[in-house]
Amino acid sequence: MKRAKLTAVVLPLLALLFVSCDDKEEQPSYFVVKVDSISAPDTIMAGEDLAVGLWGTIGHDGRYGFSHFEARATDSSLDITAWGKFTPADYAAQPIVDIDGRQYHTVAGSPGTFAIRTHQPDGTILRDSATVVASDSSALPPPQVARIEAVTAPDTVRVGETFTVEFRAVLGVHSGYALDHIDTLRTRSFLAVRIWSRDFSAGRYVTWGIVKRDYSFTAVASTPGEFSIIACQSGDSTTEKSVVVLP
């Protein structure tokens, strides 16, 4: 009888212990994501929303995912860290998980240089910046679609490989022209980009001459076949390049 009573007490305790262990094993762990590149406008008006996009690979299967941004912003700078999470699982169908241009929004408070500092897992800092101008945007001409005169990318890549795509854009005809914003659309099989520029001179002295800038984006070859890169020009015209994705 005593043995039966002891068994009746011990078995529930063991079951509770095993459940607790299982719950502990299934808890996600968190880590700093390595950021490959930053996207932000070259020029922005003081007081406007500043969208900072981060690009990089979070993990190599569906057990990985984005968790949150840790950020500290002032009128003239942004320090930001992207955090990912790993959730234990037996099966993860998605081959690669990217941060994929996820944006953090802040406000450019004062004219001058707005510094963007992205903190990396190894303690280093990836830097970018935007120029903040005080002009009233309502007094400026509307933005225009910049002409993309060149698209550079590798001819072939392997499945799962991250590669760089570069666009050379003609922003305008004098030094007052700068980047206004960039529209992007990404899928597993293509990357589409439209670059917008604007004349920010607002009556200031300018130097005449064609203004060109290079912009880089990262893409991931997820499936074998053809990966299309689409540069959207003015109107409905496009310039396209194909990358062959090998198994």
Image (tube, grey):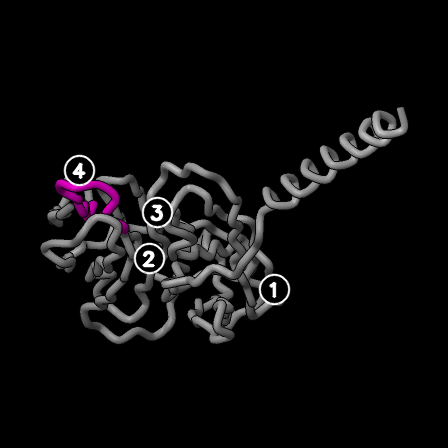
Q: Are marks 2 and 1 in contact (CB under 8 Å)?
A: no
Q: Secondary structure at mark 2?
A: strand
* Quadrant in which the N terminus is drawn: top right
Q: Residue at x 15, y 46 (%)?
A: 247
Residue under label 3, please give it: 96
- Frontmost of labels 4 and 1 is 1
Quadrant for residue 217, please give it.
bottom left
Give the CA separation, mark 2 to mark 3. Answer: 36 Å
Mark 3 crowd level (few <14, some 14–19, many ≥20, 10 Å Cα): many
Magenta span contains residue 102: no
Nearer-N-terminus badge (1/3): 1
- Segment colored magenta: 220-233
Q: Amino acid at mark 4?
A: Asp
Quadrant for residue 197, please give it.
bottom left
Q: Position of residue 50 (x, y in %)?
A: 50, 56
Give the CA separation, mark 4 to mark 1. Answer: 39 Å
Residue under label 4, please give it: 236
Image position of 205 with respect to 179: above or below? below
Magenta-colored segment: predominant secondary structure: strand
Q: Nearer the viewer, residue 53 or 134?
A: 53
Q: Position of residue 59 (x, y in %)?
A: 41, 52
